Image: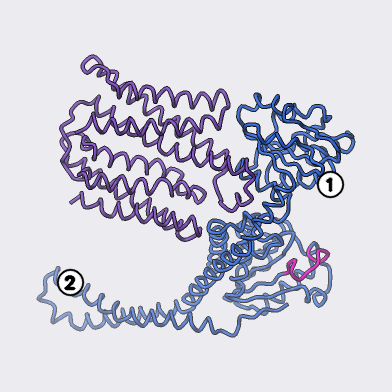
Chain colours: A blue, B purple
Amino acid sequence: MKLLLIGTSHRLAPVEVRERVAVDPDGAAALATRLAGDGEAVCLSTCNRTEIYLAASDPLGADRRSTETLAELAEIDPADLEPFLYRLEHEAAAAHLFRVAAGLDSLVPGEGEILGQVRTAYERGKVGPLLDRLFSHALHTGKKVRTDTAIAESPGTTSSAAAALAAQVFGDLKGARIAIVGAGKIGRRAARRLTKRGASLSFVANRTETRGRELADELGGETIPLERLVEAAESADILVSSTSSADVVLTKDELARALPARKGRPLLLIDLAVPRDLDPAINELADCYLYDIDDLEAVVHETARGREAEFARAESIAVEEAARFREWLATRDVAPTIASLRERAEAIRRGELAKARPRLAGLSERERNAVESLTSQIVNKLLHEPIVRLKEAAAAEDRRGPENRFEG
Amino acid sequence: MAELLVWPALLAYGEAAVAYAGNARKPGALGRLATWGVRIGWLTQTALLAGQASRADSFPWSTWAGSLNLFVWLVVGAYLIWGCSPRFRLLGLAVMPFAAALLAVSYFAGGTDAGVGTAWNDVLLVTHVAFTLTAFAGFTVAAGLAALELWEERLLKHHRAGILRLRLPSLLALDRFTVATIAVSLGALTVGLLAVFARLPDHGVDLLMAGTLAAWLLYASVLYLRVRAGRRALAARLALVGFASVLVLQLGLLATHVA
């Protein structure tokens, strides 16, 4: 069985191509079953990539079938799709998947969604010993990168910094309620980013109700006039403001009126407007954390400084895990040789013991067991060194192997 | 022979303390080493305590050093409930050096030897000491959590730009765990106090008992402030004050109630 990857991603293909080969989880499962044949297959399809991982005894045939299937999905000629495809084999394919699972190959490095997508693809694929091992190792690598590095804590934009800060205050954002003040482009973007992380939109306060209604219709929630903002602050967990108002829309005193009803629950206020919408003195209120655009920029800047180092550490974890997988792959190849070596040695041992049986006839049961155990130990000790050397040689040979290629 | 287990336990706790310090500088493998140090140390100390219990005729931790040994085990046990999660490793940096140091003190004072306790055959006294120590251990961990919560609150209030890179638990999670730990510990302290009240006709009231009652009231008010009045930060600060009172009571308990 050879490990093979054929795919396309945001690195090679424009969105017009990616969207044509993208499939939903059900489609990915069907595709994996169709392409696996008598081997194994997993199809990973997200908005940024569609990749097919195959374990096939006939890699050329599997490659051809997969290319044709992807071209069929895209409804274009295979030759026209070719420039957008990449192919990787063996450890290169494994190393690629490990980078993908770690979020290192994502459009936004370190994003966490990809790990869940890899898991879904794995669970719905047609897996056998090779892909099972590959994908469980990839999931382990993804988790390890997230645990050991701060790559996931590196927002690249102010709206993602706001979402990351919300997660720092509330943890899981599922169940967190958002109030959006000002339904313009910035407010919408922030609302979408927060709802994507599990929060729910409770209130949209806007000067014109029609505009607020549009956002409420899209993401849920109730539209309220700006005058009812204090009421919204009583139950919201995150308040994002981005109006074009020249004056402050919420003062410290107004917000203070909402606090008793909150019973100490933290309130994160994000002021994305310039000039500012929220009274800066709000930050002095207990359990209220007010961040304006400069504060968010500072968070982005600070995490960007550390991002490179975290990225390098995450890369080294992925490389380390890929080396481990390569060793497993290499020893897997020599496993039949080792098994037959053991079988042969065992047969010799048993044969010699059988020959010596007449001479051992006078031994007691306990003494015979001791001889049995002694000969087994001698054989195991004799075999230990050659087996270790065989595994090392296989791993070294695999490292030098010419078949790891990258196309595209 | 069981007493020799103190060495691997001490070694594991020490290793965890050092690894947590290293992990604070460079998160990763050291954090996992620290977690394993805590787990192995705690299991070894459990075996040590079991060995002491099996060889004792009565309560085996009736000396001040012995009760310190038990206290360390309870603190690390309480920390272990969620302390193995990567985001709580900073808490480990506070708990494990403290645990290693106290276990070392207990060892040098003979608290980890087998069969050295004075004969305590009074079940109520044993119940009182065991539950009070459990409660104190819980309050110690709750103080660590409250300190972490107040620090994180300060970072958020002052808009520290590097807050995300510290990978702290969320503010709400810290709040929830602090309250839960205090609630459970307060339950244990209540049992400890009920046991001592049952002994009142024979032994009367002393200053330490009054102090323990005051600590109970303080922690009950922490819970009231947090759960009913919604005063989160004040409750966290009071949890730290409560810890100071626990330290005083612990010293008093060691000095007066045990050999």
Q: Nearer the viewer, residue B10 or A70?
A: B10
Q: Nearer the viewer, residue A405 or B196?
A: B196
Q: Residue A275 colored magenta? A: no
State which chain disc 1 sits on.
A
The residue furthest top is B201
Disc 2 element: helix
Where is mark 2, residue-wise? A370
Mark 2: amino acid:
Ala
Q: Is residue A231 left or right of residue A398?
A: right
Where A250 sits versus B1, above or below? Answer: above
Image coords of residue A175 (percent x, y): 65, 37
Q: Is residue A179 left or right of residue A393?
A: right
For the magenta stretch, what is the residue range? A8-18
Image coords of residue A191 (percent x, y): 76, 43
Mark 2 closeness class: few <14, some 14–19, many ≥20 residues within 10 Å? few
Which badge, 2 or 1, is on the more N-terminal residue? 1
State which chain disc 2 sits on.
A
Where B126 sits versus A86, above or below? Answer: above
Q: Is residue B30 left or right of residue A52?
A: left
Circles 2 and 1 on the same subunit: yes
Disc 1 element: helix
Q: Nearer the viewer, mark 2 or mark 1?
A: 1
Mark 1: amino acid:
Lys
The residue furthest left is A362
Q: CA distance from mark 2 to mark 1?
A: 82 Å
In contact (CB < 8 Å): disc 2 and disc 1: no
Where is mark 1, residue-wise? A185
Residue at image position (30%, 77%) is: A380
Where A21 sits versus A404, above or below? Answer: above
